[in-house]
Image: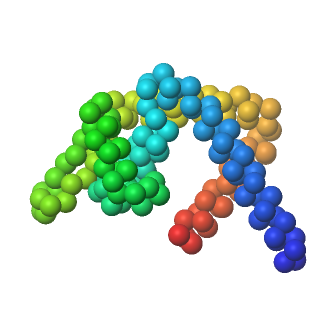
Amino acid sequence: MAVLNGELTKGLEQFLRRANIILFERGRGVLQDLEISELQFNALISIQEYGPQTMGELCKSLFVACSTATDLADRMELVELVERVRDDKDRRIVRLHLLAKGKAALEAVIAERHKFLSEVLRGYTDREHDELSYSLELLTERMELMQ
């Protein structure tokens, strides 16, 4: 069983990585049209998923140095994707918030990804849809519990 589990985890990680790369590529054209870098897009996703973030939180979620996150935030604020907002209770804390242009960029890329996935899933049966959704949901929930 341990060997099977090792083979399963290796194969599953590879499939997830390949699927992620393909989805990422599908949104790349939209990013280029909007003149948004991949790192900026990842920052927008992070803010959308986890809520407004401090520079420290952003650099952790993007796996970049704090100076890189600060430069990134400066560029994103300049083109009105995000804004810096001081905390009401502690003015020393500054968080990045999504602006309408940042939300619109996310929606455009995600819409392109949805369109692509819809095309891919068109040939699946209802049962295959249900099994895939159930398995991915279960995997995601268990991964989140182990973070």
**Nearer to the camera, 39 or 115:** 39
Where in the figure is residue 16, as x and y percent of width and height?
A: 70, 52
48 versus 36 height, above or below? below
Where in the figure is residue 38, as x and y percent of width and height?
A: 49, 39
Residue 131 shown left or right of residue 66 in the figure:
right
123 versus 55 height, above or below? above
13 versus 108 height, above or below? below
Residue 63 shown left or right of residue 18 in the figure:
left
80 versus 61 height, above or below? above
Where in the figure is residue 57, as x and y percent of width and height?
A: 36, 60
Colouring: rainbow
Residue 60 shown left or right of residue 126 in the figure:
left
Where in the figure is residue 136, as x and y percent of width and height?
A: 67, 54
What residue appears at the point 64 percent right and 38 percent down from the top-left corner?
Answer: 23
What residue appears at the point 63 percent right and 56 percent down from the top-left corner?
Answer: 137
**Nearer to the camera, 30 or 128:** 30
Task: Look at the image and tell me in which quarter the N terminus lies.
Answer: bottom right
Q: Is residue 99 visible?
A: no
Q: Looking at this rendering, what residue extends furthest in the top direction?
A: 33
Q: Is residue 8 visible?
A: yes
What residue appears at the point 68 percent right and 38 percent down from the top-left corner?
Answer: 22
What residue appears at the point 32 percent right and 37 percent down from the top-left corner?
Answer: 76
The picture quadrant where one finds residue 26 is top right
The picture quadrant where one finds residue 50 is bottom left
Count up the numbered dots. 0
